[in-house]
Structure formats: C-alpha cells, structure tokens
Image (tube, helix red, strand yellow):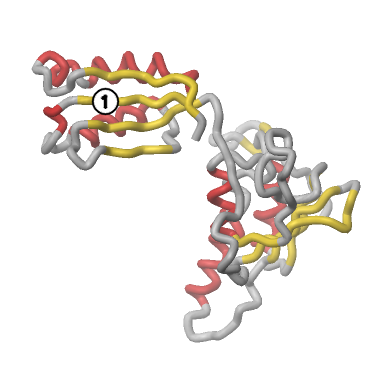
C-alpha cells in the first residue's frame, strides 16, 4: 500500500485537512490494524526511543525494547518520538480480536512496532504488547512536559462539598482544556491540577465566575496560579 500519511477529512466530512503532528504514524498504525499486519515500521530521524530527551540529557541511551503501556505513558507525558494516539488503533484491534477469539488461543494478532532511523537502519526500538521485565530496571525512562502552570483551589469549605469538583472539571471540559495532572489533598481542602500556561488567564477568570458563591461565602479561600512548572 502506497498512500499519503497525514491527509484526512474534517469532522463534517466535507473538506480535506491535515492530521497534524504524528499524523503519518497514526495512519500507518490504523492501516496495520485494519490489515492485521505482523509488523509496523516507523521511520524517523533518530535512532529510536531514548531513556530521556537527548537534547536535554547527554547521557540518554537507546531503549532496545519497550511495551505498549510504557510507551503510551511516555508519549502522554512529553516524549515526542511517537504521538500518544499512535498506538490506539493497534491496541483497540488487539482488544477486539481477543473478544472475538475468547475460545481460541490465537495470538497472531500481536503487532510489533519498530522505530528506526532512516539514516541508520541497524539501530532501533522494538515496541511489543509485553516484554520480559528486568527486575533491576525499575525506571525505564524520564520524560517531561514544559510550559505548565498549576492551578490551586484552596478552602476549608471544600471538605464534603458534594458536586464542587464536578463543576470545576465540567467547566474545564466546556472550555476544551486538557488536564495532564490532577491531585487533591486528603483533607479535601486543596484541589490542584495542571494546564498549559497559555490557558491560565482563561481558566482563572472562568473559575472565579463558576465559584463566585463559594468565594463570597469564604468556602473557597482563593484560586491561585503557580507559573513555570515542569511535569
């Protein structure tokens, strides 16, 4: 199959558009799942998947192999080599095939993914459904997401306030804001979440409107932004 990799239709289906970063990898993954391929090769300009960003850490080394789960986590939390959604068609295909073969011990639907350097083909990383875990290797890689701000919502009135968290995160959903990190103090007096710094003013302004009653009754003490955080 010879085809374009990053061209598709918009959500209305009435005009062509580009898929954006990682579009070609995603298309290759989708086609591989549809034809039940045994292998998928993703060609890049680096030797494969590294233990960390070699532009930031000079001692980064190549990972010979890694499983779907680890790679998904790495991609979501900042690894740029593969887009977080690239594996979805393959993982979904695997799950669907398993459901269709509950009474069949057929494991031929595993798709091995090879990430290789176009200019140095002899190196690369193999991505498999499962790999043999090495006990001594408790940390496989380090990733980071920059340009992040933390939003802190503080107040003793948060404790036991049913529905408040739902309102906060429903608001963020309506604004189309992605949240890569959420935590809450065990005392329920602090809710913290991370967003891209470009959305900070929009989020703060809308949270103040959403929680206007709680702020006026001192159920929420304040809403603050902590700048320049790296996850």
- Residue 146 to residue 81: above or below: above
Residue 221 placement, left or right of 56: left
The x, y position of residue 95, in whole percent, is 51, 67
Write down the quadrant of residue 163 in the picture: top left
Circle 1 — which element?
strand
Residue at 51% x, 30% y is: 230
- Give x and y (percent) for residue 58: 74, 39
Q: Please identify the residue farthest to the left as the structure is shown.
A: 217
Quadrant of the rendered structure where residue 181 is? top left
* Depth check, front residue: 31 or 203: 203
Q: Residue drawn at (20%, 20%), measured in percent from left and top?
A: 211
Relative horizontal placement of residue 181, taking residue 4 as reference (left or right): left
Of 103 and 231, the residue lying toward us = 231
Q: Residue 203 falls in which quadrant of the image?
A: top left
Tell me: 12 left or right of 183.
right
Q: What residue lies at 25% left-to-right and 16% top-to-bottom?
A: 208
Q: Is residue 7 visible?
A: no
Q: Is residue 28 visible?
A: yes
Give 114 or 102, whichever is nearer the viewer: 114
Q: How many marks?
A: 1
Q: Which residue lies under the disc numbered 1?
A: 153
37 or 146, which is in the foreground?
Answer: 146
Quadrant where the N terminus sits is bottom right
Residue 194: x and y in percent read 41, 31
Image height of 37 relative to 125, above or below: below
Q: Residue at 73%, 34% (x, y): give it.
A: 55
């Amino acid at each position: 199959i010879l085809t374009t990799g990053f061209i598709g239709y918009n959500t209305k289906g009435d005009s062509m558009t580009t898929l954006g970063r990682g579009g070609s990898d995603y298309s290759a993954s989708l086609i591989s799942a549809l034809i039940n391929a045994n292998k998928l090769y993703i060609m890049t300009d680096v030797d494969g998947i590294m233990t960390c960003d070699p532009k930031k850490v000079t001692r980064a080394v190549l990972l010979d192999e890694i499983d779907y789960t680890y790679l998904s986590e790495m991609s979501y939390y900042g690894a740029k080599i593969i887009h977080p959604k690239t594996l979805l068609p393959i993982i979904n295909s695997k799950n669907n095939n398993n459901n269709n073969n509950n009474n069949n011990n057929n494991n031929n639907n595993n798709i091995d993914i090879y990430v290789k350097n176009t200019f140095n083909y002899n190196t690369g990383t193999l991505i498999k459904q499962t790999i043999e875990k090495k006990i001594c290797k408790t940390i496989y890689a380090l990733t980071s997401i920059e340009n992040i701000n933390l939003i802190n919502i503080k107040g003793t009135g948060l404790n036991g306030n049913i529905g408040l968290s739902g309102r906060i995160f429903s608001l963020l959903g309506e604004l189309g804001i992605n949240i890569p990190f959420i935590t809450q103090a065990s005392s329920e007096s602090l809710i913290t979440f991370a967003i891209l710094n470009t959305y900070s003013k929009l989020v703060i302004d809308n949270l103040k409107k959403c929680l206007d009653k709680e702020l006026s009754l001192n159920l929420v003490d304040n809403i603050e932004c902590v700048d320049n955080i790296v996850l």
